[in-house]
Image: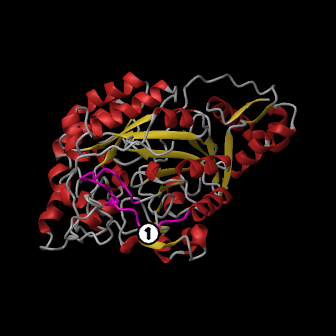
Amino acid sequence: MSVVEERASQAAPGFDPEQAWRVHPQIALRDESFGALAYHFGTRRLMFLKSRALVELVSSLEDYESAQAAIDALVPESERSTYRRALARLAASEVIDVR
Amino acid sequence: MSADVTAQPVPLRQRFTEGLDAPICLTWELTYACNLACVHCLSSSGRRDPKELTAAEARHVVDELADMKVFYVNIGGGEPMLRPDFFDLIGYAVDHKVGVKFSTNGTRMTAERARRLAAMDYVDVQISIDGALASTNDAVRGGGSFAAARTAMDHLASANFGQFKISVVVTRENVTQLDELSAIAQSYGAQLRLTRFRPSGRGAETWEALHPTSEQQRMLYHWLVERPDVLTGDSFFHLSALGQPLDGLNLCGAGRVVCLIDPVGDVYACPFVIDKEFLAGNVRHDGGFAGVWRRSDLFRSLRQPQSAGACASCGSYDACQGGCMAAKFFTGIPLDGPDPECVFGHGEEALAARDGGATPTVRIGHSKVDRAGTPIPVPTPVRFRTPARA
């Protein structure tokens, strides 16, 4: 089956949590019980967001002036560094981009 | 590939084996008509079926896929470009945010059609060849088919289509040409895609003679491990028992995260099991595609925990999951038995242990027939007609 057919070009842009982010316009998200499937129509890459909380955070980025502001508002303090790292990975695979 | 945040109470692979509300992707064969007669054709294609979905019915399927948020479909056939509404349908799909990846033998890829495809977003093209040499390829796909495929590749390159794919079914004959195949792909800036020879459709008749030997399979595994940029459609997960898992989900997604819609709207568990044993329903009734996907008894049973059967005591079961259901079914091995190409040789033992006549005969076929009505499984010379309209 053709699930992980495609690879993104590994030009990973940096992740600056102080900037304003959004879901990349070429990303389609599909909610699943485990989190969400994310498909990038540009890189043709399929990715998994493995928790509902991460999906919530990613979908809400647009409503905050910075990624850090979204994290502060939505994520318990003890987990914030974990979620920052997750967003950095999602930025590298172009699931989110600077708006 | 994935953004891990916290350890999951249920591993993702288990979530997938329990099935999702909609497939991750699916294969949709648009027509059984084909102007080639490849000896390994999974769908025994040749003649159009008079009951094939109409243009309106096909659009309705796209509507359903869009509603279910299926990101893309793998379109095949038969030769999908023989369908008169081919361009209308793929245009309709991408307009509805259902991406299209289609496989073609290339015979109908004119320069103009290549330009038309290059102008479309969300359309990927795979041209099939089964050897780096015309002689190797044409023995499987028919006389003239290699030259036609290369011409199609030239048209895509001239049209600046971008990165297309060259799709190869790995056989005993072409497995020695992997480097040359890779070089052909490179010369076009294309991606090489290798898939497994399955004993399905007409492949059931040719598998014994053409599937790679166990030594070749080991070589293939190491070749793939060293080249993670080669696409495989997850089709060699039975080889993951040899060590480091190959890239991909490494599970059988049949009826759980993938399925097949055939040209007449029948929904099968996967593209390799066109047999009534694995027929889940039809998109024309049974509540449409969504109804079949969500409620068919067959799919529900595939989403239950499966027995490891004869493989339960093998330390590599977690890696290969017992291999491919279709490969077992069409070689007459029980579904909880080993894959016929088990890397530890258990498949060969299982094949030897079959009682004569255990192999199911292929009952659903659209191979071209001779005057006596007997299917012609051998490659026939390819005839090229100028398309009436691009």
Indicate whether residue B265 is drawn in magenta.
Answer: no
**Is residue B183 shown left or right of residue A82?**
left
Image: A44 above or below B283: above
Image: B17 above or below A39: below
Q: Which residues are magenta?
A: B32-54
- Residue B221 in view (yes/no): no
Q: Quick one: label 1, few (<14), some, or many (20+) residues within 10 Å?
A: few
Q: Quadrant of the C terminus of chain A?
A: top right
**Is residue A34 shown left or right of residue B162?**
right
Disc 1: which residue: B50
Marked residue chain, label 1: B
Residue appearing at x 42%, y 61% in the figure: B270
In depth, the one of B52 and B387 nearer the eye is B387
Image: B348 above or below B292: above
Of the residues shown, which amino acid type is indicated by label 1?
Answer: Pro
Residue appearing at x 32%, y 24% in the figure: B183
Residue B377 percent location from the top left of the image: 22, 58
Residue appearing at x 35%, y 70% in the figure: B275
- Residue B68 in view (yes/no): yes
**Is residue A33 shown left or right of residue B101?**
right
